[in-house]
Image: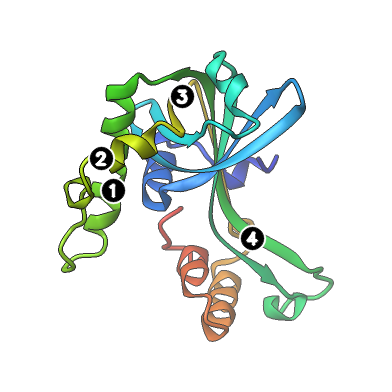
Amino acid sequence: MHPNRRFQLSDRDSIAALVRGLGFGTLFAATSQGPRAVHVPVMLDGDRLRFHISRGNAIHPALAAGATALFVANGPHAYLSPDDYGMEDRVPTWNYVAVELEGPVRALDEAGLIGLLDSLSDAQEARLAPKPAWNRNKMAVGRFEALTKAIAGFEMLVTDWRGTAKLDQDKPDAVRHRLADALATRGETEMAAAMRPEGSFE
């Protein structure tokens, strides 16, 4: 996380909302083969982060043994040219929003894994409305159960919540609006909205 305190996201609800909104991120853990990462869709309920991975993934044995893991979710981000600032002696920079969740991991049982898969598909299918929602009852008998044998579900108890929203908060509002306008012109609308002083990360 960025060391500048002005860029820190300290509100747990804001961090949780970003994770839920993204629904996806990268999980890191130490393994016998060195550090490994896996990219996972997630469900966050309170301080419980649930996810699943392939049993063949190199990170699986460490997670199954109860490793402490680090989950990273990246929000909007953008390159900013010195020319965008309208200020002298600027250098290129990259603004971004990102969060880290850390904690011990435990394996889910079969019922927990199935519940996780149902929750994940329900949440993502809801975003596709008005399309009729898909569910596993549309699969051939036995197919879902066969596929779940190849994956494992896990739950992280989140003990540390960390976030960064590096959005030029140390610059005057007029400069931040100028930067947001430049980003919007380039089509980077999500980051443009975050950059404005009245944005969602203030």
Asked if the residue at tag 1 contacts the one at tag 2, i.e. Cβ–Cβ closer than 8 Å, the answer is: yes
Q: Is residue 113 left or right of residue 94?
A: left
Give whichever of discs 3 and 1 has the lower sequence position.
1
Q: Position of residue 36 (x, y in %)?
A: 69, 34
Instruction: State the SS at label 1.
Output: helix
Residue 156's disc is 3
Q: What residue is disc 1 on?
A: 121
Residue 15 falls left or right of residue 98: left
**Residue on which disc 4 sits:** 95
Q: Note whether 57 is above or below 86 in the view shown.
A: above
Q: Residue furthest top?
A: 65
Q: Residue 183: image x %, image y %?
A: 57, 77
Label 3 – label 1 distance at C-alpha: 20 Å
Q: Amino acid at mark 2?
A: Asp
Count of marks overlaid on the render: 4
- Pointer 1 or 4: first along the chain: 4
**What kind of residue is marked 1?**
Ser
Q: Residues within 10 Å of mark 3 (few under 14, many from 20)?
A: many
What is the crowding at mark 2: few (fewer than 14 residues within 10 Å), some, or many (at least 20)? few
Q: Considering the numbered disc 4 on the image, is that residue within a helix, a strand or a loop?
A: strand
Residues under numbered marks 4 and 3 in contact, where contact means CB atoms less than 8 Å apart: no
Placement of the N terminus among the 4 image quadrants: top right
Q: Nearer the viewer, mark 3 or mark 1?
A: 1
How far apart are labels 4 and 3 at the CA level? 28 Å
Mark 4 burial class by Cα count in 10 Å: few <14, some 14-19, many 20+: some
- Picture residue at 64% right of the left edge, 60% below the top: 95
CA separation in Å, label 2 and label 1: 5 Å
Q: Which residue is mark 2?
A: 118
In front of the other: 131 or 188 = 131
